[in-house]
Structure formats: structure tokens, C-alpha cells
Amino acid sequence: MRTVAGYGLSLAILFVLSFPAYAQTDPLPSWNDGATKQAITSFVEKVTDKEGKDYVPPEDRIATLDNDGTLWVEQPMYTQLAFALDRVKALAPEHPEWKDQPFKAVLEGDMKALAASGEKGIVQLIAATHAGMSPEEFQKIVGDWLATAEHPRFKRKYTELVYQPMLELLSYLRDNGFTTYIVSGGGIEFVRNFSEPVYGIPPAQVVGSSIETKYEVVDGKPTLMRLPKVHFIDDKEGKPVGINEYIGQRPIAAFGNSDGDYQMLDWITSGEGPRFGLIVHHTDAEREYAYDRDSSFGRLDKALDDAPAKGWVVVDMKNDWKEVFPPGN
Amino acid sequence: MRTVAGYGLSLAILFVLSFPAYAQTDPLPSWNDGATKQAITSFVEKVTDKEGKDYVPPEDRIATLDNDGTLWVEQPMYTQLAFALDRVKALAPEHPEWKDQPFKAVLEGDMKALAASGEKGIVQLIAATHAGMSPEEFQKIVGDWLATAEHPRFKRKYTELVYQPMLELLSYLRDNGFTTYIVSGGGIEFVRNFSEPVYGIPPAQVVGSSIETKYEVVDGKPTLMRLPKVHFIDDKEGKPVGINEYIGQRPIAAFGNSDGDYQMLDWITSGEGPRFGLIVHHTDAEREYAYDRDSSFGRLDKALDDAPAKGWVVVDMKNDWKEVFPPGN
């Protein structure tokens, strides 16, 4: 009995000593105090309060987050598009037949002509840069590119241009029993390349757009081959569909930044019980970018109009975020 | 210092006292000792041995398991087919137009005529019983059915006709840092209904066949609607494709029981590093069923022939399993 009592006492002392320090640790240090931060912590506190009426068990604490413009920079163009353009340039010497659009536009850096090539042009670009190889080979190519490519304005690797406040939010959610998923309009295998080291989100917790993959045995070796054919577009109406398909249940919290996230936000926040929706509004031209209704990438229009009525929290990047990016090396 | 030393000593005593008891606990008590059980434990021990050359970090310890015939009974027919037939019977009064095949065959219990209706008949059955509702409504229907339906021979609920040795295997794998996934030819949303309570596998860790789902706003309410159209067949060549799509990396261990699992086993066990493939061979007509090359459900032919050369472990149910099902109530 003496040992047990002594053991209990030691533990009690440890708790008392460590508790004040813990209580003073702000889990969201890069968020300025105010209504936005308050809304986030209030939601997390109420769904984790076992005694409260809004308690949600851990298996239902699922949060889905868009990637481009929500977790990392999407200007002056989606990172995956920058990757595709670089790949075309790298592969061009082996493809003398690339004389017409969209290849001509890419090689001449003519973004207007590229935009004019439309969806057909984009599909041709994807076929040329994303297909005709195994998933493992694609991972190697993406990894090599991300390790060296630099953002044109910030002169940093793309994986360093993630939003520090959102990294803190991801950790905060997970520390409170949430499972965090990325639900991206971008390519699922592209995002899977860096989701674990950058966001702490394993490959299986990434939902995204995909091209078709075929199983074949080559020289007796089972292989998967990426085909130049779109399989699934995980954007707009596709986001709730993709979430249902990959996750199999309706999350309770959604985070986005554009009209591409509208349906995900709407479907998730209209479910029963406590719900949370948040939109990152890019209002900081100095530290990042300022854009919404007229942007080619990450257009935010209807979701911004409807946010108040829907109860979605709108982050004012300029005023709500103390820091935008993690400190540089 | 005195407190810390005392604390350390107490812990040491606890470890010493509890270790022998722990070491004697067999994690696979329903498996008879022998080569099969030995193969399983040897594999798990070597991939978890940090000092060994075959060590695999936890994030790569992914195991995929087929469901029908691998985790639960698939005779005299797939459980999901029994569900579909029961649904047709339940819905028939509202559908006087169901006069032709495959409905006539179902309502008259004529399994030969049903089989003769072929793939077209099956798709019609799926459309009539699995589509035209939201995923939530479908979950309710499946849950209600599983709560009451009984297996014709064993007179037990289907969710009780799971293999006790495989339940132990799932726990053993997870206790050793594996993430366990179901990769089923059956419908993903059907399996997700019971995977968590029965196998400890959450919905997001189920890969399976699916029909298409559409997002629509009905009376201002965002809704998903299940459509009578096949989206993905997670069988044979589809299994590696589905694994790549949902999980995003090649697992290191695969468990199946039929030729429908061949490609999954082949793709997984032909990867680099330590790999494990296992086939449940149904050899126990007394306690369960005995079938392989000539079975309509879970046909096992080529995979049985190739198992020795591929290094796949074949479970002889009759001799390797002490128990087949969990004890009844």
C-alpha cells in the first residue's frame, strides 16, 4: 500500500507541476486572437466535451481540408500545373512532334494561348506528363521535382509555402482526436507525394482527382500503369462524392478557400449535430496574395456570398494570421 | 532523486512481474501449432524486429484482406446476394412490374434461372435493391437486415459467422503496428456497415466494388444519391487498382481465398522487401464448407496451383484451425 500511495502521489505532483505550463500553451500561436480563432477553438472544445450535448465520439471526428489555397499557395498558378509545364519543357527534346497546342504555348511560355487550349489542352498535358508510367515512377518524378523547383516569387520550395496557421490547425485537430483528410481538386497521387512529411497526413487520407490505372503483367511482373484517361474529378460536386467513396462517412468539419469547395462545405455543414465550415479568404497581397471573385485559380465568389447565411467562418488572412509561412531556413 | 529512483524501481518490478504472463499469451489461440501459424508469426516478428534486415517501419506495415470466404462465410451464396434476394422479396408487393427475369427467378427461388440471367440480371438486381437512395438510407436498410437475417445452415446472424482465427489474426497484426484494410469484391458500402464493430476496421479502411453516386441539392438540402450504374469492380485485376487508388501504396501482406484475390496476392508479394501472401483453403465440410476449383462462389483454382511457386501460405482450414467461428451466445 505504501508503494502504491507513493506512486500515486508522485504522479499527482507531476500533473500539478506540468498542468499550468500546458494550459498556457496556445495550440494556435500563429492565429491572432479574435472571432475566427475563437470559433475554431469553441467548436473543438464542444465536440470533445464528454459532458456536453455536442460531444462527438473520436471515430466521427473527421475533418476534410482542401489543399490548393487552403493548405499551400495556389498563385500565380496551381503547383501541379507548374509541375506539368516543367515536365513538358524537360521532355520536349524527346518529342519533336510537340509542335501544336497546348505544347507550343507551354514551350513559348504563352499562358494566354495555353488557357485558350481549354479542357482539351489540359487533358493532353496530363496525358503527356502524368501517364504512361507506374505510380512508383510517377512518385519518383514528382518527388525529384518538388525537391528542387522554386516558387517564382518567394524563391522557396513549394512544400515550404504551406500556411503555418493551417499546420497548427491540423495538429490541433489531431491532438483533439480528429482524423484529418485532404480533399483536393488536384491529382491524388501528386498530393500523396508530400502529404505525410509536410502535413502529417498519410497517403490513404488523401482524396483527389485521378486518372485511370490498369493492372498488367509485364515480363511476368505485376505492374500498375497510369493511363491518359481521366477517372475522377474531385472538385465541386465531386468533393462530397469523393468523400463518400473514400472515407465512407460524412465529416463534421470542412476547410476550403474557393467555390470548388462549396459543395463539400454545404454537404458537411448541413448534416445533423455540431458542424464546422471555414473558408480561407486571401486578403494579404503583401505577405501572400489577395484574390477572390476574379481569380483564374481558386475563384471565391458564391461561397463568399453565402458564407454568413451558411454559418461558415471566413478567415481574413491579413488580420487573422500572425504568420503566413513557416520560418525559412 | 529518491523519488525518481523509487518510481523507476516500481516500474521495473511491474515489468518483471507482468512479462512472463505476457510472454505466455498466445496471440493466435485458435490456430493449431504448425507450419502455417509459424509462417504468420515469423513474418510479423521479422518485420517488427528493429535490429533485423527485414524491418519495416509501421507506416509501411499495411495488410489487405479479402472479406467473403476470407473473413466470413460465403456459402451457400455471398451474403450480399442473400441480402439482395431478401430485398427483392420485401419490395415485390410495391413492384407488380417485376414479372420477368431476374425478378421471377428470385421470387420463385429458382437459383438456376437466376444464374442464367447472367451479368445483366445481377446489374438489374443491384439497381433494384442498392440504388435510388442516399448512402445513409442504404446503411439503415443493410443494418436492419444484418440485425435479423439468419444463415440457412448455421442459424446464426451473418456477422457471427466470421472466422475466429482471422479475428485473432487481425488483432495480432494491429497489435504489431499493422494497418488492416478489407479489399472486397463485394460492395464497399455494404461491407462498411459492419466492418468496424465486427472486424475493428473503420469505414475508411474498406475498399470494395461500388456503384456511382451523384451529388444533388433536393429542397435546398445537399444529398448524395446512389445510382443504378456500376462504378468500380474491385475483383481480380481491380484489386491492385483499388488498393492503389484508396490506399496509395503497395501493402506488404495480402490475405485471400479465391482466384479473385490472385492479382492482389501476386502484386503485393512481388514487391521488394519482406512480403506475405496467404490463402484460406476451405477444407472443412463438417465445421464449415469444403470447396475450391468447382465452386460458384469463391472459386479457388489457379491461385491454389501457383501458391507453392509464389510462396503463398495455404491455410488448411480443417487442420490449421482449432475453432472456426466465435463461440455462440
Image (cartoon, coloured by chain):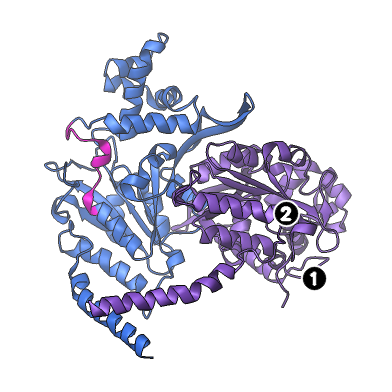
Chain colours: A purple, B blue
Question: Considering depth in this image, is B81 or A302 the residue closer to the camera?
Answer: A302
Question: Considering depth in this image, is B197 or B61 the residue closer to the camera?
Answer: B197
Where residue B285 is drawn, which disc sits there? none
Q: Seen in the image, is B274 located left or right of residue A246?
A: left
Residue beneath disc 1: A155
* Majority secondary structure in the magenta region: loop
Magenta segment? B153-165
Position above or below: A295 against B126: below
Location of residue A35 in the rendering, given as x and y in whole percent from the top left corner: 70, 52
Location of residue A88 in the rendering, given as x and y in whole percent from the top left corner: 75, 58
Say which amino acid is labelled 1: Lys
Please check whether the numbered discs 2 and 1 fall on a single chain: yes
Where residue A69 is drawn, which disc sits there? 2
Work out whether mark 2 precedes mark 1 in sequence or the reverse, and give the earlier one. 2
Q: Is residue A148 visible?
A: yes
- At 76% from the left and 48% from the top, the residue drawn is A298
Based on the picture, tell me whether residue B162 belongs to the magenta stretch.
Answer: yes
Tell me the crowding category of disc 2: few under 14, some 14 to 19, or many 20 or more residues within 10 angstroms, Cα based: many
Which of the chains bears the disc numbered 1?
A
Based on the picture, tell me whether residue B66 belongs to the magenta stretch.
Answer: no
